[in-house]
Image: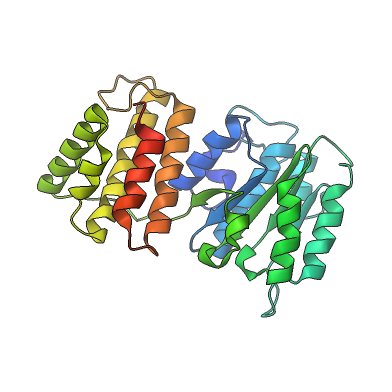
Amino acid sequence: MEKTRTIGALGGVGCLPVQERLWRYLKSQRIHPALLLVGPGKEVKYQVAKGMAKFLFCREKSKNAFCGECNNCKRIEKEIHPDVFLFKEDGEEGLKIEVIREMIGQMRVSPIEGPHKICVIEEAHRMNSAAANAFLKTLEEPGEGRYFVLTSSQSGSILPTVLSRCIEFTFRPEDDELTLSPELDKKFREILLAALETKNFSHLTSALVEKDEALIFLQFLQSEIYQCLLAKESGKTTNSVFRSLQPHDLTMKFDSVVTLEGQLRSNANYGLMIESLMRQQFSGV
């Protein structure tokens, strides 16, 4: 019987696009100390975070995924691994400083069974001000082999200085697929090509006449990057404007666009934000 899990098993809830991106990110072995999983579905994000812990500790890990059957995977599933700390939301009072201090103390101690320690904090926006500031000091100097995975359905309520130290992955419902009219698809392709060729990103943003259209453009951009990534990983030839980029770069740019989309939903200045993204991420394309 085949025991190796597929990418969908990262969270145990099916193969969501964000889980695929997380999997590619973990396999790059260039893991940032603090990751933030944002979006609806509290239990989905929590299970994905546990899957990330299994990936780090799995003893029978293949190129496809963690095994789910080794002693480490089983103990993480049961939440009894000595180097994995899981802080679930409990009650209405939020995450108090006493809880965060306990976590900080646990993460400062050397790992018991290996080179890593990982801490998962569910609904991190529930940290009160004192707890968030105490946690911030740990993020500034996390220590070798220490990883923090935060989950949240309200990332706008997280302390901005904590957010700035996290790489964010945004979850969406499984059926949230982009469909464009032929006219809008043509418009987006033309302004994207022109912007990449001329590096005149202000012209691109001026062509997006309202915030709703800007949000759809960001989803279009995500789709273009994602399709190029799939083609490269399957060894297929692609005519994508992003074909010169490597899979890791495509993944990181994809997540930058997803992060900006989330930020843009609560910010009116869409033109300036998109222009800044294009200059930072796509000037070299």
Q: Is residue 164 left or right of residue 258?
A: right
The quarter holding residue 90 reads bottom right
- 151 in relation to 54, above or below: below
- 20 in relation to 249, above or below: below
Q: x, y percentage for residue 280? A: 41, 37
For image coordinates 27% across by 27% down, the residue present is 240
- 69 in relation to 50, above or below: above
Quadrant where the C terminus sits is top left
Residue situated in front as seen by the camera: 97 or 118? 97
Residue situated in front as seen by the camera: 174 or 264? 264
Q: x, y percentage for residue 215? A: 30, 55
Residue situated in front as seen by the camera: 69 or 11? 11
For image coordinates 32% across by 28% down, the residue present is 242
- Counting every numbered tag in the picture gives 0
Residue 15 in sight: no
Residue 141 in sight: yes
The quarter holding residue 145 reads top right
Q: Is residue 271 left or right of residue 189?
A: right
Q: x, y percentage for residue 199? A: 27, 32
For image coordinates 42% across by 25% down, the residue present is 233
For image coordinates 56% across by 54% down, the residue present is 37
Colour logic? rainbow
The quarter holding residue 122 reads bottom right
